[in-house]
Image: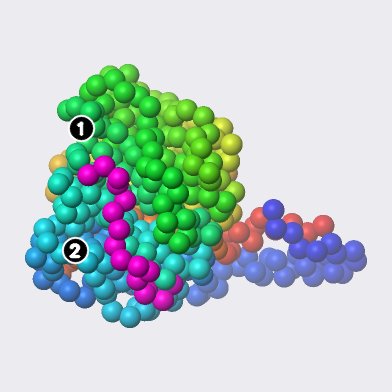
Amino acid sequence: MKRIGRVTSAFMRRTGLLLLALLLVPSAGSPQQGTPLGPEFRVNTYTTGRQGLATVASDSSGNFVVVWTSAQDPGYGVFGQRYSVLGTPSGPEFQINSYITGSQGGEDVASDPSGNFVVVWVSDQDPGNGIFGQRYSSAGTPLGGEFRVNTSATNLQVEPSVAADTAGNFVVVWRRMNQAGPANHVIFGQRYAGSGAPLGPEFRVNTYTTVPNYVSSPSVAMDAAGNFVVVWEGPDFGYVGGVFARRYASSGAPLGPEFKVNTEIPWGSSSGVSVATNAAGAFVVVWSSNYQGYYGGFADVRGRRFGRTGAPVGGEFNVASESEGYQVHPDVTMDSSGDFVVVWEKCPQGCAEGDVFGQRFDNSGTPSGGQFLVNTTTTGSQLGPAVASAPAGNFVVVWNGDQLDVSDVYAQRYSSIVPVELMHWTIE
């Protein structure tokens, strides 16, 4: 809790209360409830063909980088664009992959507090698909060449996720398909030092081995000290929509076995899972699933909070629910105080078109205001959102939209919630 210094005189006490009341009165231009900072904007400058699968990462100052898959390679390539905290582009868009034969895509990005960042993606330069990466300095300069993450080059390696700590150490997780036989998918991980040197061998995350084992959608988050948590979708009592997690120390040692996150039994497959942590290691998991006895009629976004020891903080909670249509592909980010933002794609059955929505929560898990529409343009499809926040709580959302072209990458910046946070101050 933030505190104003102790005031001893009655006059100063009244003056302090008056000042606080004035601060809490919103002015015409004051940002509230995460007000948009300017209009939505297009990220990509190359507009021929499809641009999509966007993701985003922010440093401690609020500078951010967006990466996406672009059709401007002979197949598809991975491209990026850096921005200042003010939303001004820092140089032009740039190509990340150096191997350009075939297709490269399915990327993810993580930044350390200083703005150094690492991008990982799927490349077909392995016999199947491999996971490759490229590190960058805060100035956007490549640090070495692209590197392969997975040790085994057999089978298909897909769905990479990456997270970094304050020292720049990072961990990559991914799904390996058909490990030791068909229909047996496995989540693997690989740790790295800030220098880019691997820390130990690749490791298996999930321990459940009964076939068919259709695990998918791994997501990883890392706290300031380098401890990390991996979440994924997997079989749950015969259904494929369970959400599971496993925690690790900064040394890479598991902190206990894998555990189930969801408490409701799903009735269909999940449509994405995401995890975010604060600096101390408390974390929140969000997912989308058909559940509670409905047979494919709709999908809700659900969430569950955990403390830094991995103990649940309450049961699972509702983020977005509709009696018809789908709430899918959620993503979550958490700031230094533990407040968090969830974004997702809301669409009618079939998801031919959709919009991007968001919901903010404070560090007790209480919603801060109502759901908000992220995209300004509502014609066409607005799909596949991702979100990143700075420690102060300002955040940016990116998504794929077909406003002007077949598919482009768009973004919207948001302020932190200064007037709301002032209400937590006390005068003694």
> Label 2: which residue?
99
Which residue is rendered at x = 42% and y = 56% of the image?
Answer: 197
Q: Is 416 in the magenta? A: no
Instruction: Out of 75 and 428, give the one closest to the viewer.
Output: 75
398 relative position to 360: left or right: left
To which quarter of the image does residue 292 belong? Answer: top left
Q: Is 151 in the magenta? A: yes
Compared with 118, 263 (above or below) is: above
> Which region of the structure is painted magenta?
138-153
Which residue is rendered at x = 37% and y = 31% of the image?
Answer: 206
Q: How is the image coloured?
A: rainbow
Compared with 22, 150 (above or below) is: above
Local crowd size for mark 1, using a 10 Å CA cut-off: few (<14), some (14–19), many (≥20): some
Which residue is rendered at x = 35% and y = 78% of the image?
Answer: 89
Give me the C-alpha separation between circle 2 and circle 1: 25 Å
Q: Is residue 371 visible?
A: no
Question: Total marks drawn?
Answer: 2
Q: Is residue 148 visible?
A: yes
To which quarter of the image does residue 56 belong? Answer: bottom left
> Label 1: which residue?
178
Quadrant placement of the C terminus = bottom right
Whole-percent x, y for residue 40 in the image? 31, 69
